[in-house]
Amino acid sequence: MNGETSRKSRIPWQHLIVDVERVRRTMQLGLKSLWLHRLRSLLTGLGIVFGVCSVIAMLAIGEGLSYEAQEQIRRMGSNNIIIRSVKPPEDRSSSAERTRVIEYGLTYADVERIKLTIPTVEVVIPSRIIRSDVWNGTNRIDCDIIGTVPSYPEMRNHHVAMGRFFTEEELEENLNVCVLGDGMAEKLFPLDSPLDGIVRIEGDYYKVIGTMEPESERSSMGSPDSNPAAAGPARNATGAPYEMYIPLTAAKSRFGEMLVQRSSGSFSAERVELHEVTIKVGQIDDVVETWHIIADLLTANHKKTDYEIIVPLDLLRQAERTKRIFNIVLGAIAAISLLVGGIGIMNIMLATVTERTREIGIRRALGAKRKDIVLQFLIETVLLSASGGLIGVALGLAIPFFITQFAELQTKVTLWSPLLAFSISAMVGVVFGIYPAMRAANMDPVEALRHE
Amino acid sequence: MDSPIARVDNVRKQYLMGTVMVEALRGLSVDFYAGEYITIMGPSGCGKSTLLNILGCLDRPTSGQYVLGGEDVSTLDDDQLSTIRGTRIGFVFQSYNLIQQLNVLENIEVPLYYQGRPQHESRAIARQLARRVGLDDRMEHKPFELSGGQQQRVAVARALANDPLIILADEPTGNLDSTSGSDILGVFDELNRQGKTLIMVTHSDEVSERAGRVIRLRDGRVERDERRN
Ligand SMILES: Nc1ncnc2c1ncn2[C@@H]1O[C@H](COP(=O)(O)OP(=O)(O)O)[C@@H](O)[C@H]1O
Ligand SMILES: [Mg+2]
């Protein structure tokens, strides 16, 4: 009785095992016959190899670029609007003057107006950026000194590594305290902790109260050029310029608003009240509207366009749009290359079927059903296209790796892209293999046996 | 006498060549009995191969009836005919028709494979059959490494794989020199002695003398059907 039930329950299992077994043996057969014509198989599969490989590689590069861009934008804060002073193009008539003062950029009045008239604005952070040498004894760094307010790090998603940022009290009391940007502590205080150390800028001394974590955003988003004529400040290990943060009040009183610079023999001076204003909008939905109001407000109060407005959210949307277009183009290229690869495979499989007409006749005479013949040629085609896909995936993963290694370009391989590329290449085998396989199966056995 | 193992009744086979109708078989009737050794003879183009193809379920008659092992196969569909070819028929062709990329054992296994026999079983059967036709030392060889006679012996072994009801051979010695030819005929004699039913097309009177029954065709009909002793 026990044996009876166990035999019954084994029947569907056995059926399944036979089928899996048959597919396995047919695959073995297919591999054998592909291996027999290995050069032809290789050449036939190349279309798929290159298609898959280029799509994965391009996708990885595209993802890498847009990931980097989006990270940078996100770090600027998607609720933020950043306004920067930009030196307007000089008039031709005045360029003859050897020395003059150019006055431009954002003002404290702008900040007040924005604060008072736009209710959606939550925080406004003004900052000044002055380029200068910072000294500790004989150690010197050429850096950007950023005069700002205590909420700056939080607003810019830029975090304190050691110690702390300065407080409202220190800002109000106009104290000479400073926070060192990434990489500066090692340069200025190579032996001991920078905290409570003293640095000198021109004639003034500042107490170090903290250091910042690395930040890469400014490097490629273009820092506001306080010194457009000269090369930018020295750069740290991450490639970002050295930066130091001091209270805005200190920056104003110690450096004044006049910046004198030398450029190719002539002196010129610039007067800029504020270099950068970061505005935080309370609700993300209000960002675009607030941006337009600010733009109108600035247009009304500035004679020239001596500022630029950067809206990270807008940049993010643009980046997403660009990426979408990139992906569509890539998808089209992928589709075309897989189509071409698939047609190549179909072409060869049709030739193979004709070439093996006799074999088909023999198999049919020995008991092969039509579906056995279909299975045989379909599996062979899928093996061909899938191995092409596999090689393509391997190359497609290797290329971004080498690009990252040697071109220092960030690449990002998403998990789905090799999986998708591989399954599509297998699908190509099914789609383009079905017709040759059907043709093989529908041959008349007698005719096929007579074929030379 | 027993009921026939295969019965062909008023079978016609027509081919359309362009606009001309060619009649290969014109109402042919013949019965075959278990254990017989039959040769089919006749001038070229008289319909011998056509008859053999119908007997082997490779082709279907245009009209008439074909009953194999008590079953009317003229009404079966393609899949059912394939199964019958795989289980009840063993083919031996003039040009051996081995699959070139498979070795001796693998060639013998092909009919077993299509009947879903697991590999360890079919491998054992193939070895045994290879030994039976005297190819013990050639089992791993590919067809191109064998002589014509050896290749035809592989084909005979393959025809025996599924222990068929009838073995059909279309001029099996036609491509062979006389030594290998008589070799193969020796194998057939032995098979017939063991009780296999053989139907063989041949041009040679010498060959047909070995058979117990000779059927002569002319223009798609049986001209003469003679039994010896
Ligand atoms: N597929 C076909 N198409 C057209 N005519 C055919 C076909 N097969 C055989 N025939 C014709 O049928 C006749 C019998 O052929 P066959 O059976 O091959 O003769 P044989 O006795 O020589 O084996 C011949 O006239 C031949 O031309
Ligand atoms: Mg013939």
Image (tube, coloured by chain):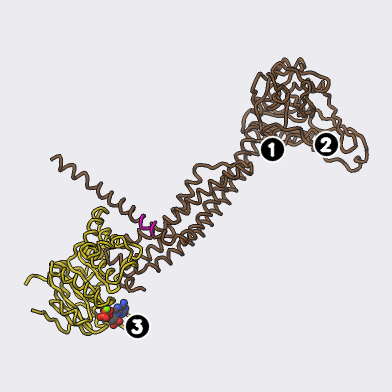
Chain colours: A brown, B yellow
What residue type is disc 3 on?
A: Thr
> Which residue carries the number 1 mark?
A220
First to last magenta residue range: A27-32
Q: Quadrant of the C terminus of chain B?
A: bottom left
Of residues A39 and A161, the one nearer the viewer is A39
Apparent side of residue B93 relative to residue A93 in the rendered image (left or right): left
Label 3 element class: loop
Nearer to us: label 2 or label 3: 3
Q: Quadrant of the N terminus of chain B?
A: bottom left
Q: Residue at x 20, y 68 (%)?
A: B73
- Does the residue tagged 1 have its C-beta within 8 Å of any atom of ligand 1? no
| Chain on which label 3 sits | B
State the image coordinates of residue B52 (x, y, percent, origin top left).
23, 74
The part of the image, by quadrant, that contains residue B168 is bottom left
Residue beneath label 3, please? B19
Q: Chain of mark 2?
A: A
Task: Using the numbered discs, state the Cα–Cα distance from disc 3 to disc 1 in whole angstroms.
Answer: 80 Å
